Structures are given as C-alpha cells and as structure tokens.
Image: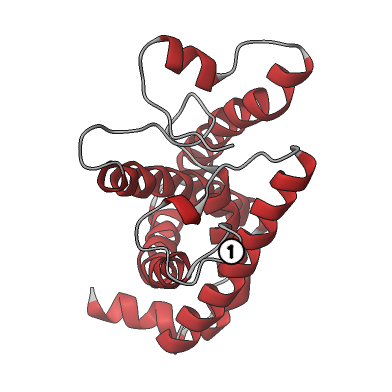
Amino acid sequence: MKKKYQDYLEKNHSFDKITMLGIFCLIIVITGMFGFLYELIFYYFNGGMKEFYWRGGNFLPWINIYATGSLMIYFLTYKHRKKAWKVFFISAIACGILEYFSGLGMYIIGNGLRCWDYNREILSFGSIHGFVCLRSVLIFGSFSLLFIYGVVPLCFYLAKNMNKKAFLTISIILCTIILIDEFYNLLFARILHLPRASKIYKSMGIRYVSFK
C-alpha cells in the first residue's frame, strides 16, 4: 500500500480521455456529497445543536460549489502534490476567491439572494461582506489535502483496478443523476414554475438554513 501511494506522488499518471471523464464524474459525486455532509454537521452546531438543517437546493445530498471547487483544486494543485504546503495555500486562496465571487454574483443577480452569510455564523473572524471568512478559507485548504491525498488517489485506484466498462457506467450514471437534479432545481423548475426541492422538503417539515 505504501509503495502504491508513493507511486501516486512520484509518477505521472495518464488515462485515456473517456477514463478521465469517469474520474471527474466520480470526483463531482464524492466531493459534492462530502460538502453536503460537512454543512449538515456545521449548521447543526451553528444552530445550537438542536436540529439538523438541509443544505443545498437539490433533492439529493449534494452541493455544487464543493464539486466545482474540487475540480478547480485538481487542475491547480495536482502537479504540486509532492508539496502539501503548496496544495494547502493554493487551494485556500483559490477557494476563497471562488467563494467570494460566487456569493457576490448570486447576491447581485438574485437581487440580494444569499445562500450563506458568515456574518450570521459562528467562527466568522475576518468575514468579508459575509461571503468569505478566515474559517472558511482554512477549512477549504484543509479539505484540499484530504481531496488530493485521499479522494484523487482513490479515484485513480478504482479507474485502474475496476473493469473499465463498469467504472465508467457507475461513475457517469451517478454524476448524470446528480446533474439532472441540479439543473432541474437551478433552471427548469424556475423557468417552468415547477416545485423545487426546497419547497417540497419544507412542506414535509424538513428544516432549511435560509438567508435573505
């Protein structure tokens, strides 16, 4: 196991384009679900440890900005994987920028819409307009280490050791299901005036964290 992990750090790994597509699909699934789990736990504590709150706007437990950020981290830091400190700092800065402008963009386009507001959360030191804070930047930098040294080698291992057809079928189907859910709630439900996941879950009594 140690030798295989050393190979991951030392060797340049090459996959054909379709296999890389499967790897990226798996990364999108894993990291988006990990982000949901993180926020589920964080907002439990932020809310006084009284109740769990659903996060994200989808039917499935998946949050898009974590998947987007993970792909960005991969392209920015994979070549620096031999030096963990570089992975941490590059990721922390890049994710901070992504988070700030994502929050600002939604605020401007959505006429004051906020999907998060660090001014209303615990451990929000260094908050900039509520869109980014020191805690979020440090956590994303730490998560990048788990991603580059845990999730990516796992995906590489599965791509190399599973039957290629099975690997691609599973990863692409899972990613497709999640993206259908995402685009339905992000676009189609709005355009066609259909019920979104948040409305349905709220009607079922599931608590949401909501900001204005």
Is 161 placed left or right of 108 in the picture? left
Which structural element holds mark 1?
A: loop
**How far across and down, in percent of the image, does residue 51 sit?**
25, 32
Q: In the rendered image, which quarter contains the N terminus?
A: bottom left
| Residue positioned 41% across, 68% down in the render | 135
**How far across and down, in percent of the image, does residue 182 sit?**
61, 31
Viewer-closest of 55 and 112: 112
Q: Which residue is mark 1?
A: 15
Residue 51 higher or lower than 162, as above or below: above
| Residue positioned 74% across, 51% down in the render | 105
Q: In the rendered image, which quarter contains the C terminus?
A: top right
Q: Around disc 1, counting alpha carbons within 10 Å, would you say few (fewer than 14), some (14 to 19), or many (20 or more)? A: few
**How far across and down, in percent of the image, does residue 23 sit?**
53, 53
Residue 173 higher or lower than 136, as above or below: above
Residue 98 higher or lower than 201, as above or below: below
* Image quadrant assignment for residue 110: top right
| Residue positioned 61% across, 42% down in the render | 114
**How far across and down, in percent of the image, does residue 120 sit?**
44, 50
- Coloring basis for residues: secondary structure
Viewer-closest of 153 and 57: 57
Viewer-closest of 77 and 136: 136
* Image quadrant assignment for residue 132: bottom right
Residue 16 higher or lower than 195, as above or below: below
- Residue type of the residue flagged with mark 1: Phe
| Residue positioned 39% across, 31% down in the render | 54
